[in-house]
Image: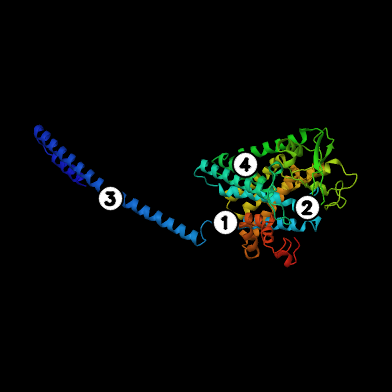
Amino acid sequence: MYLKSVVSHVSGRLKGAWPSRVSYELLRDEEKAIADCRKKDSVIEERYGNINRDNEVELVKRHCNGNQRGAENQTKNGQGKRRLASLDVFRGLTVALMILVDDAGGILPAINHSPWNGVTLADFVMPFFLFIVGVSLGIVYKKLSNKVVATRKAILKALKLLILGIVLQGGFFHGINDLTYGVNIGQIRWLGILQRISFGYLLAALCEIWLTRNSDIDSSSRLVKRYYLQWLVTFVLTALYMGLLYGLYVPDWQYEVPIKDTSSSPLNLGSKTYFVKCGVRGDVGPACNAVGMIDRYIIGIGHLHQRPVYVRTKECSVNSPDYGPVPSNAPSWCHAPFDPEGILSSVMACVTCFIGLHFGHVLVHFKGHRERMLQWIIPSLGLVMFGCFLDGLGMHLNKALYTFSYMCVTSGTSGLLFTGIYLLVDVYEYRRLTMLLEWMGINALIIYVLVACNLFVVAIQGFYWGFPENNILSVLGIKS
């Protein structure tokens, strides 16, 4: 500003043939003038610079507030963060499938859970839920602002699922034919569907929060490299399961079954003791497998599921594959409790969550529909074929044990089904055909509690006149 004019003026004055003393005094005066001009420039710049910065800050604040209000308005209008519709539809389809096999499984044993080896329609429900949990975690934790807070929230959510599962499946409610409630702590069932989901959710969530590398992803190899620690955990879980299932020695064991009194005034008639001869290693039959042994030692046989699936096998039921009277020459293990959601089998079930987590990573890091679907279809087909190959070699598909071959086939099927739903709902946008399933998927936990756990039916039966049998369901012709 003033500085340039002063400098040019000084330069012009110094070009003349002035005496040295005069030149020195003039130069000193001009330097003082230059210093004054610089001071004035700095004051002006500071004053107006602050004004400009204040204006910029105010503009940024207005812009941010406007964006925040816009985001709030979008959320209120239902136009905020968009859910993945195909995942909700898949979850809703799984809930519908669960209700179908629970209600129709007794009428159609072919769709009920397999008595032991092999898979039926009902045996896909649990892996579908675990797979969906993994996909959801990949989406939820794609951006983390605070890992400690995210860890605390994950632990609290897992605890809520665990407690809810114990209340619903621990024996507190006595079924649709009994309006009483309460459970003996010495016989409460600690394991169940929601408990297994909570284990898988917590382990996968912690790995997603803490075991992720920051790197750019532009190919499948880069994706594996970024999450290689999670794949390492998956390998360790698989190796642990296989080592314990086929390496643990299972000794002979015994259990007691109370003798039931069918008289009007029940009496304590004692119990009957059954001996089961094992003394083997690596057995995968109903009696001498390591999955049941670990549960009996850690949890206690009184806390296991009292009506296991293998009571519908040919050895234990004259109406196999349906429930029926026990044959006179039935083996001693037919009356033994066994939990299909046991500790060791839940270790392999967690692997299904990690496979779903990989599908969630593909969804986050690959933006094109075609690229996503290729990343899903290829490993899904590989898992199904590898699982069938293992089954042919003798590692049978078994839901109760959650064998490695069963995990491969069901996880691969989950991936293929999810890809098909994604193509239908999110790519071609056929939403009207799946609106009901999408609604069921959004409210899956509520539907599970009210319908699948029969709380809605029990609540309706709670209103009766005269006798408990005279309730709304009996008026409608529905047998309770």
Instruction: Tell which circle, 1 or 2, labels the residue nearer the N-terminal end.
Output: 1
Cβ–Cβ below 8 Å for labels 3 and 1?
Answer: no
Residue 203: image tag: 4
Along the polypeptide, which appears first: circle 3 or circle 1? 3
The reply to whether residue 220 is visible in this rendering is yes
Q: Mark 2 points at which residue?
A: 120
Q: Residues within 10 Å of mark 4 (few under 14, many from 20)?
A: some
Q: Which amino acid does label 3 sit on?
A: Ile
- Asked whether the residues under the numbered discs 1 and 2 touch, taking CB atoms below 8 Å apart as contact, a structural biologist would say no
- Tell me the element at label 4: helix
Depth order, front residue of 474/351: 474
Q: Please indicate, yes or no, whether residue 355 appears anywhere in the rendered image.
A: no
Is the residue marked by circle 1 packed among few (<14), some (14-19), or many (20+) residues within 10 Å? few
User: In the image, residue 176 lies at what x, y percent?
Assistant: 72, 56
Q: Residue 83 carries which label?
A: 1
Please tell me whether mark 3 or mark 2 is closer to you in this view.
2
Q: Do the residues labelled 4 and 1 touch (CB within 8 Å)?
A: no
